[in-house]
Image (cartoon, grey):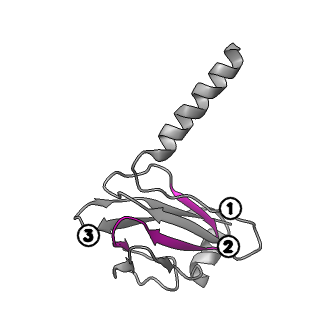
Amino acid sequence: MITKRAIGLGFVGVAVLASSSYCQRKAAKPPVPGLMNNVSVVLDNACTANPDPVTIHVQDQVSWTAKDQAYKVLFSDSPFTNIQSGTPFPVPMGQASVSGAVLPNVQKACSIAPCNYKYTVSGSSGCTNDPRVIIKP
């Protein structure tokens, strides 16, 4: 009886954490090395930074989806083909915007050791946060 109650309370705690408002960045499925994967990032209430980085492999790309408002993603040094460094990348509400493949020179550099790329998410409400993308071999 105590075990069932503890498990039930643990489940409720996880459900509460999962429903809290923050910029959710999660993979729809685990990346599979050697295959092109779209790692899904859902932007929602981006005023609060999520400490978890987006982790991809050198052959992956990122798909950003805005749930509650339009967002812009800005890399000062972009590792992706569809995102220019220093130029805001729009993510319209209710739509997905795909980063494109990792640039060849970045693939080469990150095939030796993981690389970190910080980016800024800006919402139409004026909120910003600074998450990062980790690119692994």
Q: Residue at x 37, y 64 (%)?
A: 68
Which residue bears the numbered disc 2?
37
User: Along the line of sight, which residue is nearer the eye, 6 or 107?
Assistant: 6
Around disc 2, counting alpha carbons within 10 Å, would you say few (fewer than 14), some (14 to 19), or many (20 or more)?
Answer: many
Which residue bears the numbered disc 3?
124
Q: Residue at x 58, y 81 (%)?
A: 105
- Cα–Cα gap, marks 2 and 3: 29 Å
Query: Residue 130 got which mark?
Result: none
Up the image or down, 32 lies above or below 14; here it is: below
- Cα–Cα gap, marks 1 and 3: 29 Å
Residue 129 relative to residue 8: left or right: left
**Tally of numbered discs:** 3
- Magenta stretch secondary structure, dominant: strand
Which residue bears the numbered disc 1?
29
| Type of the residue with mark 2 | Asn
> Is 62 inside the magenta-drawn segment?
yes
Q: Residue furthest front?
A: 1
Residue 52 relative to residue 37: left or right: left
Around disc 1, counting alpha carbons within 10 Å, would you say few (fewer than 14), some (14 to 19), or many (20 or more)?
Answer: few
Mark 2 or mark 1: which comes first in sequence? Answer: 1
Mark 1 or mark 3: which comes first in sequence? Answer: 1
**Quadrant of res 11:** top right
| Type of the residue with mark 1 | Lys
Q: Residue furthest top?
A: 2
**Quadrant of res 118:** bottom left
Mark 2 or mark 3: which comes first in sequence? Answer: 2
Up the image or down, 91 lies above or below 32; here it is: below
Around disc 3, counting alpha carbons within 10 Å, would you say few (fewer than 14), some (14 to 19), or many (20 or more)?
Answer: few
Which residue range is magenta in the image? 53-74
Q: Position of residue 30 (x, y in %)?
A: 69, 60
